Image (tube, grey):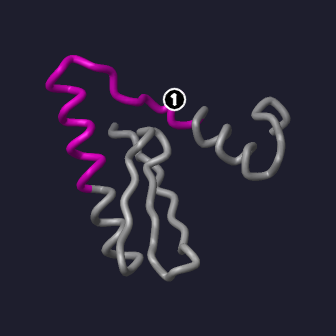
Amino acid sequence: MAEKLIIETEREDDGRWLAEVIALPGTMSYGRTHDETVARVQALALRVLADRLEHGEAVPDSDEIGAKMMARIARKSGLRPEDL
């Protein structure tokens, strides 16, 4: 079964959208609309994963995805991951 990568989006003060794939650090994209931004970051994530596989590097598994999500939630709420 393929793991799902979580995409987090937010709207900037200037109206642009920002999307990030949590389990792939640095995989971020901006766009004018929410849908455009999500499409861009999905394409970028696929390129990052393909590059990792091509070079024999690890790709995130479900445990890693879950741990990164918990850490992100904790940071945003001012907690430590172990507090969740």
Q: Is residue 49 magenta?
A: yes
Segment colored magenta: 43-66
Where is residue 30 shown, x and y percent of the image? 38, 66
The residue positioned farthest toward the front in the image shown: 14
Residue drawn where x is 14% and y is 25% of the image:
54
- Left or right side of 52 for 73: right
Image quarter of residue 26: top left
- Left or right side of 14 for 52: left
Q: Is residue 78 magenta?
A: no
What's the amino acid at mark 1?
A: Glu
Determine the secondary structure under disc 1.
helix
**Overall secondary structure of the magenta section:** helix
| 81 versus 15 height, above or below | above
Where is residue 19 shown, x and y percent of the image? 44, 61
Location of the C terminus by quadrant is: top right
Residue denoted by label 1 = 64
- Left or right side of 45 for 76: right
Residue nearer the viewer, 63 or 9: 9
Residue drawn where x is 51% and y is 65% of the image:
9
The residue positioned farthest toward the left in the image shown: 54
Location of the N terminus by quadrant is: top left
Residue drawn where x is 60% and y is 42% of the image:
69
Residue drawn where x is 30% and y is 56% of the image:
42
**Numbered disc total:** 1
Where is residue 73 shown, x and y percent of the image? 70, 48
